[in-house]
Image (spheres, coloured by chain):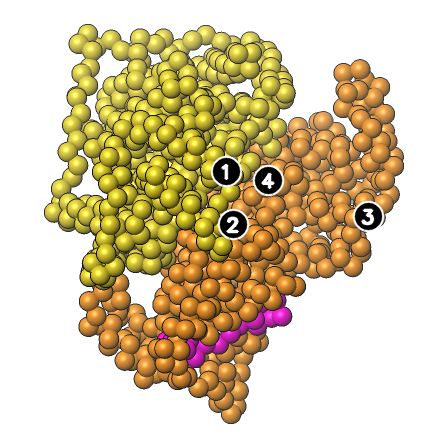
Chain colours: A yellow, B orange
Amino acid sequence: MFESAELGHRLSKEDYAAIEPTLRTELLEAQFDLLENKDFSVVILINGIDGAGRGETVNLLNEWMDPRHIEVHAFDQPTDEEREQPFLWRFWRALPPRGKIGILFGNWYSEPIGDRAFGRIKKAHLDQRLSELNRFEAMLSAEGVMLVKFWFHLSRPAQKKRLKALEANPDTRWRVGEADWQFYEEYDRYREVAEHVLRRTSTGIAPWVIVDGTDPQYRAVHVGRTLLERLQRRIEFVRKGFRPRQTAAPLVVAPDERNLLNALVLNQPMDKKEYDKQLEKLQGRLALALRSDAFARRSLVMVFEGMDAAGKGGAIRRITEALDTRKYRVVPIAAPSDEEQARPYLWRFWRRLPRRGKVTIFDRSWYGRVLVERVEGFCSEADWMRAYTEINDFEDQLVSAGAIVVKLWLSVSDDEQLLRFKARETESFKRYKITPDDWRNREKWPLYEPAVCDMIDRTSTENASWTLVEADNKYYARVKILRILVDKIDAALKA
Amino acid sequence: MFESAELGHRLSKEDYAAIEPTLRTELLEAQFDLLENKDFSVVILINGIDGAGRGETVNLLNEWMDPRHIEVHAFDQPTDEEREQPFLWRFWRALPPRGKIGILFGNWYSEPIGDRAFGRIKKAHLDQRLSELNRFEAMLSAEGVMLVKFWFHLSRPAQKKRLKALEANPDTRWRVGEADWQFYEEYDRYREVAEHVLRRTSTGIAPWVIVDGTDPQYRAVHVGRTLLERLQRRIEFVRKGFRPRQTAAPLVVAPDERNLLNALVLNQPMDKKEYDKQLEKLQGRLALALRSDAFARRSLVMVFEGMDAAGKGGAIRRITEALDTRKYRVVPIAAPSDEEQARPYLWRFWRRLPRRGKVTIFDRSWYGRVLVERVEGFCSEADWMRAYTEINDFEDQLVSAGAIVVKLWLSVSDDEQLLRFKARETESFKRYKITPDDWRNREKWPLYEPAVCDMIDRTSTENASWTLVEADNKYYARVKILRILVDKIDAALKA
C-alpha cells in the first residue's frame, strides 16, 4: 500500500510556483460553491507518520481556502465528558453541517492503530473495530458527508534522515526527543499495522490517499489536487441532478397475513387494585435500582414508540414518578432543528445521550426513520433499508459503552384508539387536543403495520431487543413496561 | 427575610386534596400555552436548606406538568470542560429555548453563598458577584426568560427536629451523617449569608420566593401557586399584546459633527517592501507568543467589525497564517440558527468560546446588536441601549476567566469602498461577489456612523478596548492589526 509513497516523489519550486495559483483559485471556487449550495459536507481525515507534514499541509489548505468555513479539530486525550460516552461520540460532536469542511486530526483511526501497534489489543479486536468504522463511514457517506482520507507517509530511511537532520541543526535539535527515536525503533511494526488498517478501510466511497511526505511541494499539490478533484466531481454530480445509485431489496409481507402485531391480544386483564399494588412495588424497585452504586457507572436509554394514543405519555410519567428529577431527561422528538437537519439523521440523538448515572427517555426516536419517514416517503427506500443496520450499530455502540437500552412498542386496537381520540376531543386538557394529523395517521395504519413489523424483526438484537406492549388496558400496559424495565436493569447490573 | 417562613406553616391533607386537582390542571394548561406559543422561556432556580424539600417539590412539579417539556439540571462539581470557562458558562449551556421550562438545582447562587458562609471569600467579593448576578438576571429577563427563584427554608429548630427524627428511625438513620450535624452547627452563619444574598438579589423582575419547607403539603401548594400565577400573568400579558415598558435615554450626536471615525486619517502610508518585512516579523512573534507555556493557560478571543470591504477577511488570514490550524477557529457570524433564535442573543457566542490554549476569531460578533440591529430596527432602542452594559459584562467575564479579548474596527473611506466594491464586481473569485445588500448598507452609512461611535465609546473598557484601524491601505491595516494583537498578548501574558 505504501509502495508508491516510498519512491521519493519531488516537485521543484518552479513547478510548484506554476501550479499553485490555479490550484488555490479552483479550491476556493469549489469551497464557495459548497458553501452556497450546501449540498453536502466534507470531512477530511488527517493521519500518518510523525514528521510527514500533516500540520503544515493543513495550514496550507487553510491558507488556500477561506478559513472561516473550515473547522479543524484535533483530538488528543478525551475530556471527562467524552470519556463517559461511546468512542465515536466526540467525533459526532465535531461533525460539520452541510456546506462546511471539517478537518479531523487524531480521528477514529488513531486509537485503533496505536492500540494494535503497541500491543494493547489483539488482531481480532482490531478487525472488529475496523469493520465498525467501515460501516460508520458508509453511513456518513450515504448521509451526505464526503469523506477524504489522507495518510501522510515517510519511509523508514526517510524518517531516520529527518531525525538526524533535525538533530544536526542547533535550532531544531530540541524537536527530537527520546520518544521520537523510540517510535523510530517501532517503525516497522507501526507501518505493518497501518498498512493493514488502511487496506481494510479503503473503500470505494472513501479510499485512503497515501501522500509521500518527504517533499513539501509534492505533498501540498498531491493533497490539494485530490481534494479539488473530489469536490469538483461531487459538485458536478449534484449539479447534473444525479443521485447516488441506491438499490434496496423490497421487503415482502408474510403471505399468510399473520404478523407480530395482529398476533397480539391487545386487551389484557388488570384491575385498578392490582395495578396500584404492582405500580407501587415496581416503582420502588426501579428507584432502588437506579440509586445503586452499580448504576452510577452505567446509563439508561429508553425508547418509546407506538401508535397515537397508545399511552406513551402516561407510561413515561409512571416511570419518571419513581425517579429523582435530577437523574432523568425526557426528550420528545418532533421536527428537527435546522442545525440537526444539516447533519446525518442520528446526530440529533447522539447529542442527547445521557451521561453516566443518568437516564434519557426518548418519546419517539431514531426509529422515525423506518416508520414515519418510510411511510410518508420522506426518505427513499434505500435510505430506510440501510437504516436498520445503522441503528443496530448505533445501539451496539451505546451498549458497549455501558448504556442499558430498553425499547418499547405500544399497540392499541383500532376500536380503542377511536375511543381515545374521541375522548381527547372532548377533554378539557388542551395538551390532549387531537390534530388532523392524528386522524390522517390513523387512516394510514395499513402502511404503518408492515413498517412496524419490519422494524421489530430487523432491530431486535441481543443487546437491545424490542418489547411489544398490549396497551388497550392502560393498567396492564404500564405495569408490563415497568416490569420489563426493572428486569432489564437488574439483569444488566448483575451481568 | 425568613420571618414568615419560620412561622411553621401547615396545610392539612384534606385541604391539599381539595386544592391539588385544580392546581395541576391549571399548571398543565399554562405549560401547554407556553409550549404552543413559545413567547418566553422559564428558568426556575431551586435553592435552600438541606432537607427543606427541594428535590421532592421538583419531582412533584414534574408529576403535575408534562415532564417532556421540563429540563432539570443539577450542577455539582464542574467537568473539566466547564472549569476552563467563565463561571456562568455551564448555566448558559443549560438555558432552555422559548416554550420550555428549565429547573436549575445548584445554580449560580450556590457557590457564592457557600464560599462566603465557609469563609472562602470576603464580603466585598461576595457583593461584587451579587451585583454581577443581578445584571445577568436583568439581561435574561429582558431577553424573554422568566425567572422564578425559590428558597426552601427550615428554621434552626426545625432542622434539628428533622435530623433527630431521621436518626430515630432505623430505616432512615443512614441519611444523617457527620456532615449534616456539622452543617447544623454552621446554620446561623449560613442563614445570615443567605439572607444577605437573597435581599441583594431580590428584584422586581425576579423576586425570591421563600418557601417554608417544614410541611410537604404547604410547600407544594406554595410553589405550585407561585409558578402558576407567574405563568398566567405572563401569558395574559403577552396575549393582550403588552410589551415590557422599556425606556431608553436617546443618544445625541456631538454638536460639532466631529467624531471618532471622521477624525481618522484613513490612508496611511506603507509600501509592499516594508509590509513584507513587518508581516514576517509580526507573524513570527505571534506564533511564538501563542506557543508559549503562559498562553496554554489562557485563551484569545478576537472580534473583527468594520465596514463592508474594509478588509476583515484579508486581515484574518494574515493572522491565521501564523497559527497552527489546530489552535484556532474562525467563526463567521451570519443569521442565527433556529436554536439560537430561541434564546438570548449572547447564547450563540457563549457556545463558541475557545477552550484553554485556543483562539476564536469572530468575523462580526455580538456587536451586531448595537450595529445592524440598531440601524435596521431589528430590536428596539431600549434593547440596544441595554446591550452596551450586557456586552461589557460578558467581556468582563471572559477576561476574568483568563481570556485575552482584542477588538478591532476597520474603517475605509467612501471612495476606497466604492473602488473595492467595483473591483469585486469584476473579479473572478465568486466568493468576492457583491450583493445588493452591500450597496444598500453603503447607502446607510450615515446611520451606521453614530452607531459605531457610540459602540466604541460605550464598550471600550479597561479589560477590552477597541482599536480603530485605518484601512484604506491594506498593508498598513494588516500590520497595525498584527502589532496591536501581538502587543496585547505579550502584555497580558506578562501581567
The answer, for residue A82, to whether it is visible in the render is yes
Label located before the other in sequence (1 or 2):
2
The CA span between labels 3 and 1 is 47 Å
The CA span between labels 4 and 1 is 31 Å
Residue A306 percent location from the top left of the image: 37, 23
Q: Which mark is residue A179?
A: 1
Q: In the image, what residue type sits under mark 2?
A: Trp
The CA span between labels 3 and 2 is 47 Å
- Host chain of mark 2: A
Along the viewing direction, whichever of B439 and A237 lies nearer the viewer: A237
The CA span between labels 2 and 4 is 34 Å
Along the viewing direction, whichever of A421 and A135 lies nearer the viewer: A135
B477 inside magenta stretch? yes
Name the residue located 45 percent from the left edge and 35 percent from the top edge. Answer: A183
Q: Tell us which disc is closer to us: 3 or 2.
A: 2
Along the viewing direction, whichever of A41 and A13 lies nearer the viewer: A13
Secondary structure found at label 1: helix
Q: Are marks 1 and 2 on the same chain?
A: yes
Residue ID for mark 4? B79
Q: Residue furthest left?
A: A240
Residue ID for mark 2? A174
Residue A86 percent location from the top left of the image: 46, 29
Which corner quadrant holds the N terminus of chain A?
top left
Q: Which residues are magenta?
A: B459-478
Name the residue located 19 percent from the left edge and 67 percent from the top edge. Answer: B428
Q: In the image, what residue type sits under mark 3?
A: Gly
- Host chain of mark 1: A
The CA span between labels 4 and 3 is 24 Å
How many marks do you count on the picture?
4
Q: Are marks 4 and 1 in contact (CB under 8 Å)?
A: no
Residue A224 percent location from the top left of the image: 25, 51
Label located before the other in sequence (4 or 3):
4
